[in-house]
Structures are given as structure tokens and as C-alpha cells.
Image (cartoon, grey):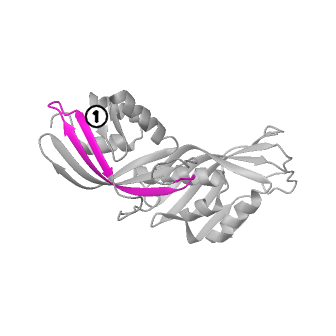
């Protein structure tokens, strides 16, 4: 199969660059047939992927594969990780921080140059007889899950961002001291969002199976006056940008410790969010 390396294809798929994937691996006139839809050619398929992957990262975790000269048959546990609301997502309605896994059976047919000419796919229901990877770690899907965690945190969704913590997680904040336990941390942030919402913008990220190091801008937006806010007093409509370094310790794919340190001078925009 000259020109087609399935391991390289999976890495390219998991990178999230759909256009580059299709141009590199798919014949211009290839056909896709799925359980409920079919497409002819690159343009139609890319349009579908643009819709399907809007706020969703799709990650291949290969379970088994059979190869011949011109065909590849694969069993895949496919993770779908949400960073925006997708009530219309085909396999399940998703909110930021949600992850579902779907079993795929996929047949690729290749031409003599190793380009995919046909892709046939069928699925089982979401989370039916699938494996589950640890939430966070060094795999591309676990990296995507961290961004989903940030989206859930920024949305103030304590039920969802709390899923990424161990029960005994410890949070060290320069402005609020130490908070211990999943529920205590969730309660702290949910209480804070009654007056001030914190949003996370990730500038740089390093992850492995033991920890996460992130260069982050925390943006605190006041939707009520908060004269006693722990970072600094805020008025309704203020937006405070605080550069921070955050180090997360992981245990079995979940966050068990968080250390936050200031990484620069905060900047305040008076009434910016009014």
C-alpha cells in the first residue's frame, strides 16, 4: 500500500486538521457511506466534517485492524469531546466538558497509490461496549479533554468541570488560600459566578500522564458589583485580565492538585463588559 501508512493517518486525523487530512489521504472522487448519510467527493465530506467538528474534537483510539493490499478494516473506539454546546450532535446532545465514546467499524478501500477511494462506516450506540481512556494525559484526546474542561469551567458549569477532579483534589490560589475537595472547589467557583465569571484563555500547554503545565489568562468579568472580590475590587461590567501559570498534578487521568501562580501584572478594563 504505497503512500498510505495507517498509523500516520490516525495521527493526522487526531491532529484535528480535516482539510489537510482529506487532501493528503483521500482521492478527489472518493465516496463515504455511513449509517445514516452518504457523500461523494472531498468537498461534500469536508462540509460534513466542518459541521460535525464544530466545537467537537473527534479522536481515534484503535482497538483492532485487519489489512490487505487494497483494504483496511478497523475497529475504533471514537472519543467525541465537546468544547461548546452541541444539542444537535448526532450521537448525543453535548455541553462543554462532555465526552462520549462510540464504537466504529470502518472499511477503507485504497487505490494503487494508497489514496482512500471509499470509506464505509457503521456504529454502535454511544458508550455501548466501548473502552474508556483516562480523562487527562498525554494522548491527543486527553489534550482535547483539557480544553473541554476549560470550556466547562469558563461556562461556570460546576457539575461538568468537577468531573475532572479527584474527590480529594487540593487547590492552591494566591488570592484565596487552599481549598480541599472536589465539592468545596466546585462550590467556591459556583458561588463566585453569582457576581463574577472567570474565563480561561490558554496561551501555552504542556501535558503528559502525570501533569499539566499551562500558561493562562484568567479573565474575571463582574456582572454585579464585587467590592470584596479576592483578586481586587470590581464594579459591574469590569473585566480583569490576570496572567497566571497553572500546574495540575494528575492521578489516573484526573486532577488531584492545582497550583496557581501570578505570571504578570493584572490589567483592568473598566465597564468593558457592560
Q: Where is residue 8 in the image (x, y as percent from the top left)?
A: 28, 41
* Residue at x-position 65% and y-position 70%: 183
Residue 27 visible to the viewer: no
Total of numbered circles in the picture? 1
Question: Which of 226/90 is in front?
Answer: 90
Q: Where is residue 257 in the image (x, y as percent from the top left)?
A: 57, 65
* Residue at x-position 49% and y-position 46%: 56
Q: Main secondary structure of the magenta part?
A: strand
Q: Is residue 71 left or right of residue 120?
A: left
Q: In this view, does 220 lie to the left or right of 228?
A: left
Figure check: 253 above or below 199:
below
Q: Residue furthest front?
A: 36
Q: Regarding mark 1 in the picture, which secondary structure is present there? A: strand
Which quarter of the image is occupied by the N terminus?
top left
Q: Does the magenta stretch include residue 105?
A: yes
Q: What stretch is highlighted in magenta?
A: 93-122
Where, by quadrant of the figure, is residue 3 drawn?
Answer: top left
Q: Is residue 144 left or right of residue 199?
A: left
Q: Position of residue 202 (x, y in %)?
A: 58, 45
Residue annotated with mark 1: 31
Which quarter of the image is occupied by the C terminus?
top right
Q: Is residue 64 left or right of residue 203?
A: left
Q: How crowded is mark 1: few (under 14 residues within 10 Å), some or many (20 or more)?
A: many
Figure check: 108 above or below 22:
below
Question: Which of 47/194 is in front?
Answer: 47
Residue 30 visible to the viewer: yes
* Residue at x-position 59% and y-position 60%: 160
Amino acid at each position: 500500500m504505497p503512500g498510505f501508512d495507517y498509523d500516520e493517518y490516525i495521527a493526522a486525523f487526531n491532529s484535528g486538521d480535516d482539510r489537510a487530512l482529506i487532501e493528503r489521504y483521500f482521492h478527489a472522487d472518493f465516496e463515504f457511506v455511513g449509517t445514516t448519510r452518504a457523500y461523494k467527493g472531498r468537498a461534500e465530506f469536508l462540509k460534513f466534517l466542518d459541521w460535525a467538528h464544530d466545537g467537537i474534537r473527534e479522536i481515534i483510539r484503535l482497538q483492532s485492524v485487519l489489512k490487505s493490499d487494497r483494504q483496511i478494516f478497523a475497529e475504533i473506539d471514537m472519543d467525541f469531546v465537546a468544547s461548546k454546546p452541541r444539542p444537535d450532535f448526532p450521537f448525543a446532545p453535548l455541553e462543554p466538558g462532555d465526552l462520549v465514546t462510540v464504537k466504529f467499524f470502518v472499511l477503507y478501500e485504497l487505490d494503487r497509490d494508497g489514496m482512500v477511494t471509499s470509506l464505509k462506516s457503521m456504529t454502535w450506540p454511544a458508550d455501548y461496549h466501548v473502552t474508556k481512556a483516562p480523562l487527562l494525559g498525554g494522548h491527543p484526546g486527553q489534550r482535547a479533554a483539557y480544553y473541554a474542561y476549560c470550556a466547562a469551567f469558563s461556562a461556570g458549569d460546576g457539575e461538568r468541570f468537577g468531573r475532572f477532579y479527584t474527590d480529594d483534589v487540593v487547590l492552591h490560589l494566591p488570592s484565596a488560600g487552599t481549598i480541599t475537595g472536589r465539592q468545596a472547589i466546585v462550590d467556591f467557583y459556583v458561588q463566585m459566578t453569582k457576581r463574577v465569571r472567570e474565563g480561561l484563555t490558554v496561551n501555552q500547554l504542556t501535558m503528559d500522564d502525570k501533569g499539566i503545565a499551562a500558561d493562562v489568562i484568567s479573565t474575571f468579568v463582574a456582572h454585579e458589583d464585587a467590592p470584596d472580590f479576592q483578586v481586587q475590587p470590581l464594579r459591574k461590567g469590569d473585566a480583569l485580565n490576570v496572567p497566571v501559570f497553572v500546574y495540575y498534578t494528575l492521578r489516573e487521568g484526573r486532577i488531584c492538585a492545582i497550583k496557581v501562580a501570578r505570571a504578570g501584572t493584572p490589567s483592568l478594563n473598566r465597564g468593558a463588559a457592560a
